């Protein structure tokens, strides 16, 4: 039986800014604006009372909360805090999988104490040494631990024992499962399925028929089953979105709107989950009807529809008019340990 802990810091960037500047305490604070297209990276809990949220445009946040205090993003500071927190994790286990600067899975199966006791101790050390609060979820796998860490947020924790997994999952909206975005949620809703309990009632074969292997995965997820290992393979190198068409696409013009939709999805993912990462290059991937494939890539520091359009043409030309069965768009990130000469690296690197 595995013991997995998911730790998630509470309004991480904003909490650090509040700690650094006590005058901000008790006041609504948003972190962001500036670059990143004028959106909030996060807001403290005071600002959330007014509805301010991550990824919200600054003008909108100001409408909701006119006395919002906006502070600029300081990634170097957040990275340093993140490293301190990870060092604390390292006192308990070597199996650490960071998901972002403020979030990680820990596999503590090998320790004798209960998962809840270990999580309490980790949170106490974080508070003591950084002055920041963390929330934790404890469960028999990553899926459960991650969902549970939201349960008693902020500054709380929640444990789900193996025997309680079924109850825990029943009322959970399907959108909380990993891999279920708005599109998939829509499809399931059209089938009358909103909760994992309802999804669980679906026949496995039927799910497989409708959604292929992903349907089988859904069948397991709805039961709270998840056997993914806590992977110590450091941080994500890229983010992408790809789509296999039910009917091959025959023209470059028909590919363009598909590409735009994918760029939007990649952008959302980058802004929601990888806002701290530096983009190194943009990538377009194509698979043709004869199953050959090609990838067009260019060093570029931001998601730029114009550059993507050029990459699309480049890949399309390589196909020499062959019909396209799969299109993908993505970004590759710079390794966080690559140091501080991005321009040099970019011109030489690709
Ligand atoms: P989250 O853990 O999602 O949010 P949070 O820590 O601010 O708040 P919570 O208490 O609900 O956990 O993200 C961690 C940090 O990542 C967050 O402080 C800022 C950054 N971030 C963005 O830059 N853009 C985003 O869209 C999100 C969701 C987070
Ligand atoms: Mg957080």
Image (cartoon, rainbow, N blue to C red):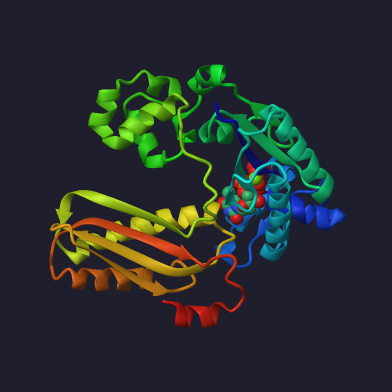
Q: Residue at x 63, y 67 (%)?
A: 34
Coordinates of residue 12 in the picture (x, y in percent) = 69, 50
Quadrant containing the C terminus in the rendered view = bottom left
- Residue 33 shows in this picture: yes
Q: Residue at x 50, y 26 (%)?
A: 172
For ligand 2, give the image quadrant.
top right
Coordinates of residue 295 in the picture (x, y in percent) = 30, 67
- Residue 52 shows in this picture: no
Coordinates of residue 326 in the picture (x, y in percent) = 24, 55
Q: Residue at x 57, y 36 (%)?
A: 146
Return the residue nearer the eye: 220 or 66.
220
Return the residue nearer the eye: 64 or 163.
163
Return the residue nearer the eye: 112 or 155.
112
Q: Quadrant of residue 92?
A: top right
Position of 349 relative to 100 (above/below): below
Coordinates of residue 320 in the picture (x, y in percent) = 14, 71
Q: Residue at x 23, y 30 (%)?
A: 209
Residue 144 shown left or right of residue 322 in the figure? right
Residue 60 shown left or right of residue 206 in the figure? right
Quadrant containing the N terminus in the rendered view = top right
Q: Quadrant of residue 283?
A: bottom left
Q: Quadrant of residue 124?
A: top right
């Amino acid at each position: 039986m595995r013991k997995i802990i998911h730790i998630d810091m509470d309004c991480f960037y904003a909490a650090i800014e509040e700690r650094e500047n006590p005058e901000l305490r008790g006041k609504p604070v948003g972190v962001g604006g500036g670059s990143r297209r004028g959106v909030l990276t996060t807001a403290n809990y005071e600002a959330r009372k007014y509805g301010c949220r991550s990824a919200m445009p600054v003008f909108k946040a100001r409408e909701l909360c006119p006395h919002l205090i906006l502070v600029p993003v300081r990634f170097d500071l957040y990275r340093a805090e993140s490293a301190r927190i990870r060092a604390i994790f390292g006192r308990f286990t070597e199996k650490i999988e960071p998901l972002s600067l403020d979030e990680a899975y820990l596999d503590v199966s090998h320790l004798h104490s209960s998962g809840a006791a270990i999580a309490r101790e980790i949170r106490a050390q974080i508070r003591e040494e950084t002055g920041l609060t963390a929330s934790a979820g404890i469960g028999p796998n990553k899926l459960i631990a991650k969902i549970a860490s939201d349960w008693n947020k902020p500054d709380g924790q929640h444990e789900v024992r193996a025997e309680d997994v079924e109850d825990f999952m029943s009322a959970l909206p399907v959108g909380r499962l990993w891999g279920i975005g708005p599109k998939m949620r829509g499809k399931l809703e059209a089938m009358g399925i909103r909760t994992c309990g309802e999804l669980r009632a679906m026949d496995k074969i039927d799910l497989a028929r409708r959604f292929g292997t992903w349907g089988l995965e859904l069948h397991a997820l709805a039961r709270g089953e998840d056997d993914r290992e806590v992977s110590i393979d450091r941080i994500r190198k890229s983010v992408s979105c790809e789509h296999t068409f039910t009917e091959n696409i025959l023209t470059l013009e028909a590919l363009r709107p598909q590409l735009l939709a994918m760029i939007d999805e990649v952008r959302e993912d980058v802004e929601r989950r990888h806002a701290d990462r530096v983009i190194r290059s943009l990538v377009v991937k194509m698979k043709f009807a004869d199953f050959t494939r090609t990838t067009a890539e260019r060093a570029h520091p931001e998601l730029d529809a114009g550059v993507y359009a050029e990459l699309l043409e480049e890949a399309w030309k390589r196909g020499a008019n062959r019909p396209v069965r799969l299109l993908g768009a993505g970004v590759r990130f710079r390794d966080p340990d690559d140091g501080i000469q991005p321009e040099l690296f970019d011109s030489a690197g690709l």
